[in-house]
Amino acid sequence: MLPAWIVAPWGNAHAQDQVLIFSAMGDVPYGSSEVPTLQRQIRDHNKYSPADFMVHIGDIKSGSSSCTEALCRDMAGWMRALAVPTYILPGDNETTDCSNPSQAWTYWARYFTDFDAGFCGAPVTAHQSVRHENWSFITKGVLCLGIDLPSPPSSVNQTVWNVLLQQDADWVSQQLRDRGAGVRAAVLFSQDGPGDSHQNLFFTQFRAAAATFAKPLLLLHGDDHTWKLDHPFAEANILRACVNNGGEEDPVQVTVTLDSRNPFTLLRNPWSSSPVVYDAPPCVDAGPDLAVTLPAAASLNARSTDDGDPAPPGRLTLGWTTTSGPAPAVFANPTAAATTASFTAPGAYVLRLTADDGPSHPWDEVAVNVIGSGPILSIADAQTTEGNSNSTDAVFTVTLANGDGSTIDVDWSTSAGSAAAGIDYTPVSGTLQVTGTSDSRTIRVPVTGDTDVELDETFAVNLTHASAGTVARAQAVGTIVNDDTGTPPPPPPAAGVVTLLAVQDSKVNSSSGSSTYGAATTLRVKTDSETYDSFLKFNISGLAGPVQSAVLRLYCTDASDHAGFAYRVADTYRNTTTPWIETGINFKNAPFFAGAPLNAAVAAPANAWVPFDVTAAVTGNGTYSFGIHSPSGNSAYYSSKEGAHPPELIVTTGTTLAMAARDDNGGGGTPAAATRLPAQLELGRGFPNPTRGLLTIEFALPRPATVTVAVFDVRGRLVRRIDAGERAGGPHDITWDGDDTAGRQVGSGVYYLHLQAGGETARMRVTVLR
């Protein structure tokens, strides 16, 4: 959990610039004959699927079979084998259509309530108070909703049924209203879909809520046992998908792209043709932070899951280590997720659990506060109203428990959060002396009054270096309450995402050097006895800020072990100044390939989008041509702009730095005469982002200032602090090598960079891929 004083810079964005992939199934297993099919689908999903989570949308049995507890128990056991978080919705066959619906619901609730919580890495999920089985979560900028909406029983009591429908409608309407502003799209999962008049109360209100939401919304349901993909309502933003009977068809794979208009791509039977093994990194969760009193040991309840790849060996190795603390912890079983840790000295410890499947070795950490048997110090939070002028003290209370009459000295100091030191409060420090068997002392921090309309701000007071005893709570949060009327200024604009289609594209063939293929519906790349290369051209215009990332996406129609390498090539025919066009380019006049490829080597799965990271080549508005070349003799085929899935270039931009040049040497020299100093600290782009190691961060200063960068993980823990020294006013950059404070590579995941300069703070989200 983030410490309260760290104000999350991502607000409600929820990683809006990441593509989301998930899977959905339903109406399976219909009897014992379909159980092997379900188990095979689970194994295949673990082996081949890149999905972040799975949803079973109901009907885990046929309508004619008995509603037994064993049915729910067995189904729960089978679904637990999935390597990704899994959600299960109620279907009518196992609940309302049973001879004893009340007993059937007891069985369902016993095994499937909070089913997702049993998986490592499950999103933080909210539940409706009146119907706990209705849930919602946000991941990668998409709001996901699940509701209890089975087909109505044949002898439905409409008055009673409407109670369920109204509760469902209330939940969906509330979630779209309260959380819709922070997402780019939404998905609603249910067992039943539209078409039955008994469900009208729900769908009437759902349509109204979707219209107000006004962003793309996918309604995904089952029950009909036939595939449907259509727009059943007048509201154009609602796309409906009905999955086929799960006994006849594998789970559907849904990709939510960054397209702001039509983001949903659905792939049926995703492993039907030469599937490529997808080795997802293990999930590791070290568990909640702990506090123990010596001589007790800490019970560590971590968990880790993996998809079993690569195979062989398909094994997951766990290992506990001590990241920091007065002395190494002693683990009863350092290779087990659930174990105990013993300590020889009191103090603050950080323990790390690493999960290693061979190619990937992510880790997670747990903080353990080990309290001695003697005196215990702790500091409490404080809050003060800002005021309009002068200063008001925020008063923090330090308490001593289990004192033995001796005097204890403890150092203290302030640290910035969203409040800026020297502007919002006076940075102070000192040494506090606490005496007695039960005593308390206060620390006073001056808070500066002003008339600016702003959000409440926070800072921290930290206790360190106690001369005796144990510090049980070492950090307190100080909240500065804004008392000025008006509307606070909005946060900086989020990064913009632009999706562009190719204006020219064609393949070329070495065996037919003068032939043109501009009208073909496919692109092709391979190299053996003959070579096929492909070329694409995009026109980029209207970008309002610097490019943070650029991804070329090609839809693969025939799989290959090598997707190909992307290169930036000339916009003109070879050795000419004439722009190439698809009806004129051939193998003899195509632009040369030069320099290093822009992307890493990956396989190309069939019937799926393949991303090529071309960020290094895209700098802003203009014309960009790319060539794709593969060293493999196994052809990769892609849809051309004349095909069903035209190539896309997705460009993400950030805010524009007020600079005409950048001080690349990292020094504090005088900026160029043409440079316009910004009015306040401005943070540009971090590139490359995602990064596999070295990250460069652009920023501009309004005046000379001392610059530091703090790197936090998603739980708000400080990973690295970079002191960049004094910098002159104007543009600069700074690099992070991807290491933590101890010089170790950080694991794959999302990190948050806080750049501080002259009392101002700017923040950036970064994705690390290992």
Image (tube, grey):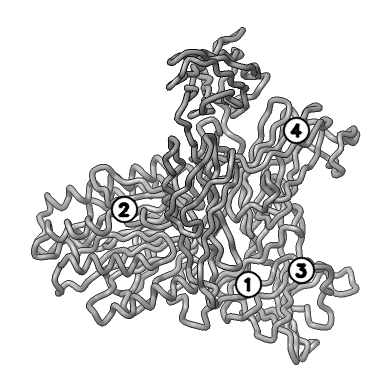
User: Residue 641: which numbered mark, if any?
Assistant: 1
Verify CB contact (< 8 Å) between mark 2 and mark 4: no
Residue 233 image position (x, y, % from top left): 35, 58
Q: Earlier in the sequence, mark 1 or mark 3?
A: 3
What kind of residue is marked 3?
Pro
Q: Earlier in the sequence, mark 2 or mark 4?
A: 2
Residue 374 image position (x, y, % from top left): 47, 26
Verify CB contact (< 8 Å) between mark 4 and mark 1: no
Choose mark 1 or mark 2, whichever is in front.
Answer: 2
Q: Earlier in the sequence, mark 1 or mark 2?
A: 2
Residue 691 image position (x, y, % from top left): 68, 55
Q: Is residue 766 above or below residue 23?
A: above
Name the residue rendered at 80%, 83% in the picture: 587
Name the residue rendered at 17%, 57% in the picture: 105
State which quadrant residue 69 falls in.
bottom left
User: Residue 707: which numbered mark, if any?
Assistant: 4
Choose mark 2 or mark 3, whichever is in front.
Answer: 2
